[in-house]
Amino acid sequence: MKLDGKTIYAQSSDIKSRTYLEYRKDMKKKAIAELEVLKWLGSKVKQLYPKKRVKVYKSGGDKFLWFLRKGRVSSESDFIADIDKEEIKFEFQYAEKADLKFYDFKVSKVTKKKDNKRRPIENKFFVYIHKPSLKYAIFKPEWIMKNGDYGMVPAWRSYAFRVPKGKFEELFEPDSTLKNLCSKIDAKNFILNFQHELIDINKDKLSYLLQSVIDENKIVEIIPEDLDSFFKVCFILDNLNKIPQNANLWLVYLLSYIGKNIMLEDIYRIVYCIDFLYSKIDLKQNELTQLVNKVKELFKKIKMYYKEDGSYRSSLKASPLEETRYALFSINLLEDLIQDMIFYYSVSEFMSIKKIYENVENIGKTHKLLKRTTKNGQEK
């Protein structure tokens, strides 16, 4: 992956046991929630400052790329509000469960050391959404220090300010608009989990294939100039955390597979390989131009395969469920790719992605279809 013109790997201990793609999935959940909340938060800040000009925007190290490339945890706030000429920071958290005994807040988000004393961070608010009750609260770090206890959070393996349930939930206010907001977040997280299962499906397929060499005396073939073979090689290298020596040439060769008659199964394999190779190289201008044109072509083809029931279909041989998974998986990685190319290569041919899965034709229809036709990601 590229950072300041250099090719590096994600090196956080949190992601050593996973591929970079798997790490990104976890970070994407945070991005989904924050990007959906942005407009809603803007309306709440305007209520706090009714007579002032207010603009709220995404902040933090992940404000554009959604996940930090080196696997670091940012200490920056999630949002910033420009209120006339004053800048106010907002830290965003939300609860998925209704039965929490404590609400936890990281010390670095609440306080700063000054004269060897912990003092609450100034010009900052926390905004907290309690999804099960469709309620929210906005409060300052001072409130957390006053009402919370400093203690160990087992899930985090670190100390934090822990506010007891009874005290914290007194702050919550109901908001009818949260129902639609939380539904969108849930729908996109469902789709994210559904499409990402393609990684485990391919791991299982490859595992069975390799086992059959010993168990059934079968031969595993890696065939030159074959897309499926190209995909298998990239998949194996990715999981071994290895880089092809001629990664730039591999990428150019891979783009040649994008033709008129490719199906969704071909597209997801190509996009996976593009994502794998792109993150390991620095692109030359001619390579970048080719990639930009091919990304546009891929989006057109995926859109062409969308059906009115919310599914994606390109072939009678594969099930609509699996083809829809291929399409969603591809859209997810292509949106990441667009953001990265804009950020690192100043590509002007694309508009930046404002919300995750904004290139899914009808997120509501697709979510309902998947909920109706799947159980734990499997066809009913």
Image (spheres, grey):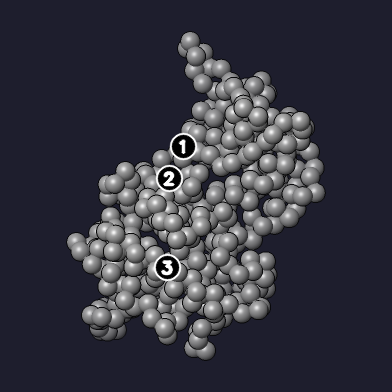
Earlier along the polypeptide chain: callout 1 or callout 2?
2
Residue extending furthest left? 245
Please indicate whether residue 147 sits to the left or right of residue 324 in the image: right
What residue is drawn where x is 75% and y is 43%? 135
- Residues tagged 1 and 2 counted as in contact (Cβ below 8 A): yes
Residue 68 badge: 2
Quickly name the residue at label 1. Answer: 74
3 or 2: mark nearer the eye: 3
- Image spot of residue 316 (x, y percent): 52, 89
- Residues tagged 3 and 2 counted as in contact (Cβ below 8 A): no
Vertical relation: 314 (above or below) 11: below
The residues tagged by marks 3 and 2 sit, at their Cα atoms, a distance apart of 23 Å
Quickly name the residue at label 3. Answer: 295
Earlier along the polypeptide chain: callout 1 or callout 3?
1
Q: Is residue 146 visible?
A: yes
What residue is drawn where x is 49% and y is 17%? 113
- Among the 4 quarters of the image, the one containing residue 217: bottom left
Residue 318 badge: none
- State the residue in front, 72 or 267: 267
Image quarter in which the C terminus is found = bottom right
- Among the 4 quarters of the image, the one containing residue 339: bottom left
Amino acid at pointer 1: Ser
Amino acid at pointer 3: Val
